[in-house]
Image: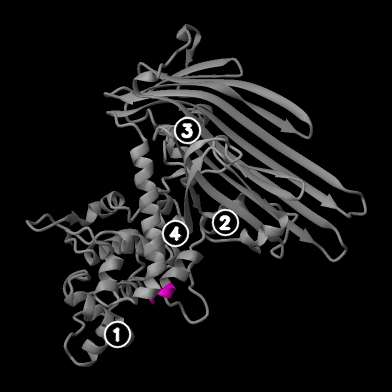
Amino acid sequence: MTMKTKILASTLLLGALLASQMSLTAHAAEDDIILISPNPAAAKTTAADTDALLQGQYEAYAGMYSYDGIADQLYSIKVLLGDGVNFNLDQIPDRQQACVMVVRMRGEEAAALAAYEAGEITCPFTDITDEWVKPYLAWLYDKEIVLGTGEGKFGNSTCTPEMYITFMLRALGYNVTWDAASDTDVLYADALNFARGINLWDSRLALEPEFNRGVMSAVTYQTLAADVKGTYQRLLSALVGAGAIDADAAQPILDLYDAVDTAAAMELAAVPMMNGMKLAGEMTQEEYYVMSVTGAPEGDTVDEISSTLAFDVALDFTDGRQEYALDGGITMQVSGMDMTVPMGMWLHDGWMYADMMEQKVKTPVTEETALEGLTDLPALFSDTGYQYYTVSEVLIEELDGTDPSGLTGTLITYDATDFMWPIIAAQIDDETFTADAALSALVSTEKFIGADGVLAGVYNGMYAILTETDGTGVTRSAEMLSQTGINYTAWGDDVVLTFPDFSQFVEETAAE
């Protein structure tokens, strides 16, 4: 599949991800930041309110996302302590450090130290020479959470996702082994896939360049939200009930877990049930970037680039079908010059067809490759609903038609600014700015459920302003807006797919 075809596939499949998109539509006007969705209610914040947005230095970040907010929450319940100065979230943990995290997550650090001191538990691993870690390993071995590498060895090494996920699954009560046995819940080789199924691991975390302490913190946070095996009780709730973690400290985290679950349940109930997915909608994607300089000796300058994609999309992935139709185009504006390119893409009868700039090509696809475009989607568009570590606040509003939108229904908003800001910084990267530049950013998610109880729209986007004034009084400012939205127009049997005449489409060869 060519890059051109993949880009088109990604655009379509982005719209087809149902409630799996984060969203917001934003527009800047003079001194105001206007936040409006194509469908639901409008909210407005003036420049005086920007303290409510993320503000910090513009600097490089080792990973794709920020785990600072998660680290703060874990610190509040004494699960992540750091070195007394910072949390070292960029650091790659070894197995010993990971084991300490597990004991603290279970709220058993004091008990482990006391039991080891009293001789009630001992460290069985002959290759461990660091005395400080022996109480932790002794407790974990006693609880059958850490078993070592065999022959009495612990085998300290860099901790991998598979290793840490195994620790987390065992902490939840699952029996993870290397070989199948009668009481095995999960094989070590399948640990990551199993963890995806219970929301301990996802594609967003998998795309991080390294399994560092930040990613480890996110996995820990998800584990605390998960149910203990065989129960409907969160691990964190169970630990609070057992007195292992302070109830007052844990309550804000539990409240956020509950808010996300409530919103996710509402979203799920708003998607019509069918054997697969069959929907139609109007999808838009907008990008806007403006760079301005004021007070420079050579005069003020403004450079502006923007693009808009607009498509009608319909797809049918029910009863074994894999068909979709995408019609629309892209419009670009660069320094006042406009260019419009019509586009179309269709998946039909085992072929993927693409029409762009009067080039009509087709590519055969199999069941496995029909959704290949999904691999090009950034993890930004992964599901938000159950990824607690991405969300800092959830707001559910009932619209009664009296607000400026005039709509009735339910608006669910997720705030993911704290987690997403490194991606914003990367998007707006410019050699003009130094690490002292101030970044104000906003990332929000809106999912609108109509008065009929059916999901009517999903809107995703981010807005950021980067400013810096140097010693000569020259001010540089970069403003970026990225937004994606889909208004659903039909579900189920009301969806009709139409296809053009494909006789003029030429098959792409491997060389092409």
Q: Secondary structure at mark 3?
A: helix
Q: Is residue 375 magenta?
A: no
Query: Which residue matches tag 2?
Result: 422
Quadrant containing the N terminus is top left
Badge 4 marks a residue whose secondary structure is: loop
Q: In what element is the residue under mark 1?
A: helix
Is the residue under label 3 in contact with that under label 1 (CB below 8 Å)? no
- Front residue of 162/144: it is 144
Callout 3 crowding tier (Cα within 10 Å): few <14, some 14–19, many ≥20: many
Question: Residue 170 location, x and y as percent?
Answer: 22, 64
Residue 456 in the image: above or below residue 23:
above
Q: Secondary structure at mark 2?
A: helix
Q: Residue furthest left?
A: 182
Q: Which residue is mark 4?
A: 210
Residue 62, percent across and down?
54, 61
Q: Are marks 2 and 3 in contact (CB under 8 Å)?
A: no
CA gap, disc 3 to disc 4? 29 Å
Tell me the amino acid under the disc marked 4. Answer: Glu
Q: Nearer the viewer, residue 417 or 151?
A: 417
Q: What residue type is disc 2 on? A: Pro
**Can you identify the residue that label 3 sits on?**
15
Near-viewer residue (37 or 507): 37
Q: Seen in the image, is 486 located left or right of residue 178?
A: right
State which mark lies toward you, 3 or 4. Answer: 3
- x, y (%) of residue 459? 52, 39
Q: Are marks 1 and 2 in contact (CB under 8 Å)?
A: no
Give the residue pinned by disc 1: 110
Q: As shown in the figure, which amino acid type bears the numbered disc 3?
A: Gly
Indicate whether 101 appears above or below 36. Answer: below
User: From the viewer's perspective, is 191 left or right of 272?
Assistant: left
